[in-house]
Image (cartoon, grey):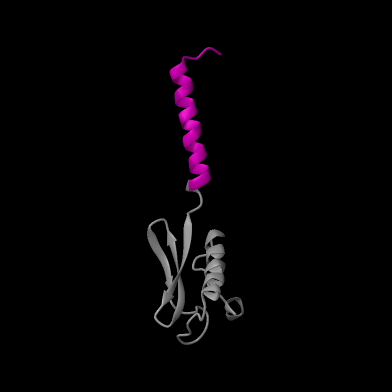
Amino acid sequence: MNRPLSTWLVLGLWAMLLGAYWLFGRHPHYELRVFQADSGWGYEIRQGATPLIYQPIVPGLPGQQRFTDEAHARRVGERVLSKLQRGEFPPTLRPEEVR
């Protein structure tokens, strides 16, 4: 098959665009950020530049319990993040998942 170079360039560009869509367009990109709140710790999950979840208290437990340390906030935030990445929305946590 003897095609002109411009045809191959266009086909290559389409292939690159489809590949980028397959890699990046199918799954939203989420980012976890842990922060220090007034009386404890919390986490935020962003989808791109948009805040999706702002969590200054421990989810799934009664009352307004705070995360006492950064590691606990990060572990719970990572659990929520993994649920989002699997397509679970809302990413509900049971009390045993939080402890």
Task: Indicate the quadrant where residue 78 lies.
Answer: bottom right
| Vertical relation: 62 (above or below) 5 | below
State the predominant SS element of the stretch in magenta. Answer: helix
Q: Is residue 19 magenta?
A: yes
Q: Which residues are magenta?
A: 1-24
From the viewer's perspective, tell me whether residue 16 is left or right of residue 49. Answer: right
Give the residue drawn at x 52%, y 78%. 69
Give the residue drawn at x 52%, y 62%. 84
How many numbered callouts? 0
Seen as rendered, the residue at the extreme right is: 96
Give the residue drawn at x 58%, y 80%. 95
On-image quarter of the N terminus: top right
Q: Is residue 55 magenta?
A: no
| Vertical relation: 37 (above or below) 31 | below
Q: Position of residue 81 (x, y in %)?
A: 53, 64
Give the residue drawn at x 47%, y 60%. 31
Q: Position of residue 76 (x, y in %)?
A: 55, 72
